[in-house]
Image: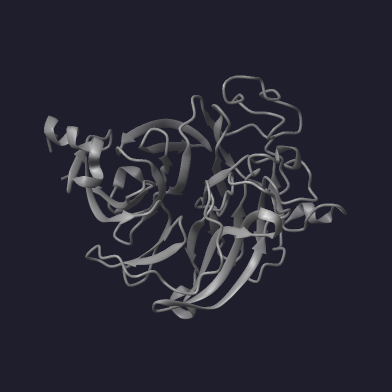
Amino acid sequence: MRISMLALAILSSVVAADPAFVASQQGNLRIDTVATDLAHPWGISVLPDGRLLVTERDGRLRYIDKSGQLSAPISGLPAIVVAGQGGLLDVLTDKDFAKNQTIYLSYAEPGADNTNSTAVARATLDGQALKNFKVIFSQTPKVDSKYHFGGRLVQQADGSLFVTMGDRGNQRELVQDLSTLVGKVAHITPDGAAAPGNVLAAQSKAQPLIWSYGHRNIQGATLDDKGRLWTHEHGPQGGDEINITVAGKNYGWPLITYGEEYGGGVIGTTSKAGLEQPLHYWVPSIAPSGMLFYRGAMFSKWQNNLLVGSLKFGQLVRLEIKDDKVSHEERIRIGARVRDVEVAPDGAVYLLTDEDKGAVLRLTPAG
């Protein structure tokens, strides 16, 4: 299908147009707006009946039905710090959701004296209410900061959860300290205990929940077809990176990075013995958020491609992977800050746009 110049011009305000079209290397795309007027949506999950669960950073959890209608906010959420990058973050449906109606939420949890940290809770979704709400994880220490919460949630086949965290923006000296949960990936059971496989738990001073460390701010995480955890994280000024995140490994922040201080200034070096090199990195930064491997039926040429949202450039970044390396990168213009990526049961791709009036977009082949 030929894409007209008028259709391409529409992309700069895609959330106001329905549909819009964009050219892609593997076939032209149609972009439909499913829902609008969301306040900085952050996480999305598809329910078995086709409805969507979407978080808004300002502390609301909503359904979106098949017609795009937003529900009233779901009740039962706890006190949430809504400031800077903090608020209600990710939502994840349990692998056995159809049986147990269980969801997991990450959010900025308040502490004493204006402190806060990333927390994870489990709850039962019962219509317009959350029941049996239980906090199963709280990052320590809590600090006075509005930044770098991490907050992505991934569930393994055994039910255990990965929780990504950041360095809180002002605590980079704690990232290499295994007695804290700053700048780490945690690996927990559904009840919040240390999950099997956390090899650092054998060290006497290490937090037993730690899976990996040396992270700046992870806002994208997913599993590959081998069950391995892939993450991406924000660098400082430059140096956003993708890693296959392995138990016990140190990913280097702030000792190594391909970025620099905002406004200029060296941070550490780019490599050091014992610290993991990124699988892929971006200079300048794309500000990545949300990530998954595409395994749907709708885009046959995207099979096992890694899809990454870009906040800075308003793009969907498509990465072809060969032998655990990025063999090709395509940047697809969306025209709004892409916060999260999800795949519908039919193989369509959902995108969340992180704006004052954010949207859920649906990508399908144009024809």
Up-down relation of residue 315 to residue 133 (above or below) = above
| Residue occupying image coordinates x 25% and y 46% | 15
**Residue in the foreground of this view, choosing between 207 and 174:** 174
Task: Judge by depth and name the residue closer to the eye, 75 or 103.
Answer: 75
* Residue 115, visible in the rendered structure: no
Res. 279 visible in picture: yes
Q: At 56% from the left edge and 53% from the top edge, which residue is drawn?
A: 151
Q: Residue furthest right?
A: 204
Going 60% across and 57% down the picture, which residue do you hit?
A: 162
Whole-percent x, y for residue 149 in the image: 59, 49
Q: Given the current orientation, which residue lies at the most extreme front position?
A: 113
Q: How many marks?
A: 0
Decide which of 97, 305 is in the foreground and name it: 97
Residue 61 x/y as whole percent: 42, 65
Residue 367 figure quarter: top left
Q: Position of residue 246 (x, y in %)?
A: 66, 46
Q: Is residue 136 left or right of residue 350?
A: right
Residue 186, quarter of the rendered image: bottom right
Q: Nearer the viewer, residue 80 or 186?
A: 80
- What's the colour scheme? one colour
At 76% from the left and 53% from the top, the residue drawn is 199
Q: Residue 242 at x, y = what percent?
A: 54, 38
Does residue 311 appear left or right of residue 358 in this picture? right
Asked where in the image residue 117 lies, by quadrant, the reply is: bottom right
Q: Quadrant of the N terminus?
A: top left
